[in-house]
Amino acid sequence: MPQFDYEIGEVKERDSNQTSRFEPLPRGDYECIVIDTTIKDTKAGTGQYIEVTLQVVDGPASGRRLWDRLNISNPSKQAEAIAKEQLDRLCDAVGLTHKMQQTEQLHDVPIMVSVDIDRKDETRNRIDSYSKLSGGTSSKPAPSVAAKKPWER
């Protein structure tokens, strides 16, 4: 039988100012990076979307994740147009100005993400907008072998 040494009750209670890992983030702007993008078929099988996974990299919410779904192909041309406008803002925020050939071009660039509470489900966040960080450029720095990504502390 494996040995396990654990003191029950050692974990301190969370500060009331900290949000739980499962509660939505408060409305506001958060410095984030895109850490994953996946192109998926819609549930109905009539279109596709890009699922964007972001991670907050600064402040008390550092480490928290957010998700966005961008309908790149949809029977509803209005839904498609809204998603493509949002994708244009995301591309601009990470410094892509001409053409995106791989969704990985969106990854690992610090950007500002405007977050709100989802109107249909108050237990979830929704992303209002993407923008460049103020006071700096959002172009990718040259990769460094020794540099760790923010989630690899």
Image (cartoon, helix red, strand yellow):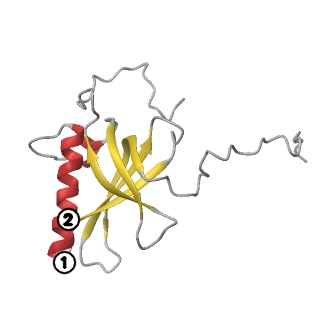
Residue 125 in percent (x, y) is at: 44, 60
Amino acid type assigned to the residue bearing label 1 in the image: Ser
How packed is label 2: few (under 14 Cα within 10 Å), some, or many (20 or more)? Answer: some
- Residue with the mark numbered 2: 82
Taking the image as shown, residue 110 lies to the left or right of residue 56, namely left
| Secondary structure type for disc 2 | helix
- Residue with the mark numbered 1: 76
The residue drawn where x is 26% and y is 29% is 140
Quadrant in the picture for residue 74:
bottom left
- Mark toward the viewer: 1 or 2: 2
Establish if 67 lies above or below 102.
Answer: below
Residue 115 in percent (x, y) is at: 38, 53
The residue drawn where x is 57% and y is 57% is 23
Q: Looking at this view, is 83 or 118 the one in front?
A: 118
Establish if 25 lies above or below 6.
Answer: below
Taking the image as shown, residue 151 lies to the left or right of residue 99, namely right
Residue 57 in percent (x, y) is at: 45, 36
Q: Which of the two labelled residues, at mark 1 and mark 2, occupies the earlier sequence position?
A: 1
Q: CA distance from mark 1 to mark 2?
A: 10 Å
